[in-house]
């Protein structure tokens, strides 16, 4: 009989309820539940005095606000966060390089600049929210140019690009330029209005060089019929993109974004470790992953810091953490403002609790680099990226930095997708069964006897099939493709 509780680390003084536990039920060795414990929530394994640490994953996730007796439910009513303000950190390196393994292959699109894409789409990118509706109309009218060689023609809307100042406008420009450069797009129409702050001339300064066959620009104010004028360009762009065909590419060229959201008490013991196992395997094959959600590193940041490959990367990680804390403090917000109501309902008690599960998506690889928001990936391997915990903003940020697809773990479920294929991995089997149209893979099987190696094999195979166009992410099938840009600044 499989135990109803799961103790993650030998030093933990709490365990996770695998199934709902009733008051008076005996679980584990001589442990009787003192009250009902919902699935995914924590039960005390021994007495935890008031003021003592609650230990999970081998690390403190908070302190007891009163005495907690063996068998009692351990959650927000009796636990307080230990998170505070800015901290000083010391570098104690303990990471080791992964043993290289021969890379597998997938069928991708080799672009003229040498980059590789996993989709061959034509994108319409507005410089400003004022023309988003026009971009959508152009998308609809351009379907006449779609060929069998194209995976789709998509317009991406957003509300920004005007009345922004300084770094806020720069963030918008960097995000849009990251999408314009993205190799999943065989061709791109950049659609401006003509009078916006983020006008085409200003955007081009951030974009740098471009291939005029692949990227074309148009201001709507310059034409009597802007849709008709755009269709002339779209015909050319679709013809150019249709010249590409899939060819065999090494998995070492894959970049995968790592994200979690709507988590539960199982996320840190099934889905997130599974994605971490995938990340290690891809990196061992020479590929790259991008881990973001900086607020969901708070409380677990030293795990990542001590895996930095050198002191330079360590100091960049310290800045990443403390600068994001300063962002919270600048607006008078508590640093422990997460987890969300859904996270708490799923069994996550404090931000430390969520963070210690969250960072497991990064596996055990060395941290190679830290990226500012909107910066493209430069070093292969595990990269940390400046970005918030918000699902769509963070997922879009990984795409902007070059991720070909995103692995998104969840214990609650969500249908969203960002501009690149967004694969959903459920932390529990019940979610997969309930929301089969949302969930691509069930990590909950790890609780019922499936091995980590077995499920990692399955996930890796799924990623390669999606990258090769042999399968779609469920979010693609639902046509969920949204852009959200990180905003932090004054609007005029």
Image (cartoon, rainbow, N blue to C red):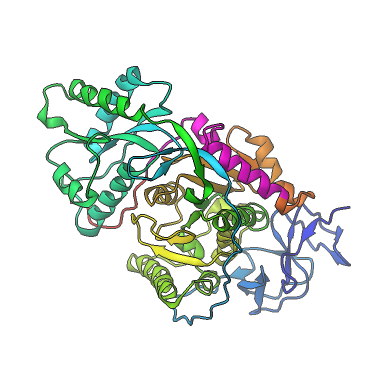
| Residue at the outermost top position | 144
Q: Nearer the viewer, residue 243 or 46?
A: 243
How far across and down, in percent of the image, does residue 216 sit? 22, 34
In this rendering, position of residue 394 left or right of residue 24: left
* Res 39 visible: no
In this rendering, position of residue 50 left or right of residue 24: left
- Is 473 a magenta residue? yes
Q: Residue at x 60, y 38 (%)?
A: 439
In this rendering, position of residue 381 left or right of residue 181: right
**From what the image shows, is residue 41 above or below residue 126?**
below
In this rendering, position of residue 150 left or right of residue 137: right
How far across and down, in percent of the image, does residue 309 sit? 49, 72
* Res 384 visible: yes
How far across and down, in percent of the image, does residue 181 sit? 32, 44
- Is 302 a magenta residue? no
Q: Nearer the viewer, residue 289 or 33?
A: 289
How far across and down, in percent of the image, does residue 382 sit? 49, 60
Q: Which region shows up in magenta?
A: 454-483
Displayed quadrant of residue 359: bottom right
Q: Residue at x 24, y 43 (%)?
A: 210
Q: Nearer the viewer, residue 488 or 139?
A: 139
Q: Main secondary structure of the magenta part?
A: helix
Displayed quadrant of residue 238: top left
């Amino acid at each position: 009989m499989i135990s109803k509780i799961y103790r993650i680390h030998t030093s933990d003084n709490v365990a996770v309820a695998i199934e709902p536990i009733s008051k008076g039920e005996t679980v584990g060795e001589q442990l009787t539940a003192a009250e009902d414990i919902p699935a995914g929530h924590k039960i005390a394994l021994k007495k935890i005095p008031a003021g003592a640490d609650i230990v999970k994953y081998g690390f403190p996730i908070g302190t007891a606000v009163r005495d907690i007796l063996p068998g009692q439910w351990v959650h927000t009513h009796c636990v307080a966060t230990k998170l505070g303000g800015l901290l000083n950190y010391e570098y104690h390196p303990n990471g080791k390089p992964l043993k290289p393994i021969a890379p597998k292959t997938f069928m991708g699109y080799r672009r003229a600049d040498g980059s590789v894409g996993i989709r061959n789409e034509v994108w319409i990118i507005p410089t400003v929210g004022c023309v988003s509706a026009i971009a959508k109309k152009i998308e609809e009218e351009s379907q006449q140019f779609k060929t069998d060689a194209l995976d789709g023609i998509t317009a991406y809307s957003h509300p920004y690009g005007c009345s922004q100042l300084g770094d806020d406008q720069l963030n918008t420009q960097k995000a849009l330029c990251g999408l314009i450069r993205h190799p999943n797009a065989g061709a791109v129409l950049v659609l401006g209005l003509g009078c916006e702050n983020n006008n085409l001339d200003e955007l081009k300064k951030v974009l740098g060089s471009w291939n005029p066959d692949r990227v074309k620009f148009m201001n709507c104010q310059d034409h009597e019929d802007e849709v008709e004028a755009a269709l002339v360009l779209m015909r050319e762009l679709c013809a150019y993109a249709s010249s590409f065909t899939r060819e065999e590419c090494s998995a070492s060229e894959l970049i995968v974004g790592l994200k979690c959201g709507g988590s539960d008490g199982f996320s840190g013991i099934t889905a997130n470790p599974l994605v971490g196992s995938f990340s290690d395997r891809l990196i061992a094959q020479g590929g790259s992953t991008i881990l973001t959600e900086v607020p969901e590193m708070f409380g677990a940041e030293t795990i990542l810091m001590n895996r930095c490959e050198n002191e330079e990367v360590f100091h960049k990680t310290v800045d990443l953490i403390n600068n994001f804390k300063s962002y919270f403090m600048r607006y008078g917000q508590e640093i422990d403002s997460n987890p969300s109501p859904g996270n708490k309902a799923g069994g996550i008690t404090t931000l430390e609790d969520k963070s210690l599960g969250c960072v497991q998506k990064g596996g055990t690889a060395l941290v190679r680099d830290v990226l500012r928001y909107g910066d493209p990936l430069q070093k292969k391997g595990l990269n940390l990226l400046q970005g918030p915990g918000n699902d769509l903003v963070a997922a879009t940020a990984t795409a902007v930095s070059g991720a070909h697809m995103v692995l998104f773990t969840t214990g609650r479920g969500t249908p969203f997708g960002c501009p690149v294929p967004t694969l959903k991995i459920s932390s529990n089997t019940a979610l997969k069964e309930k929301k089969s149209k949302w969930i691509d893979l069930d990590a909950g099987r790890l609780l019922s006897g499936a091995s980590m190696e077995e499920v990692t094999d399955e996930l890796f195979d799924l990623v390669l099939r999606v990258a090769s166009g042999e399968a779609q992410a469920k979010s693609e099938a639902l046509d969920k493709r949204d852009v959200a840009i990180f905003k932090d600044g004054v609007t005029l």
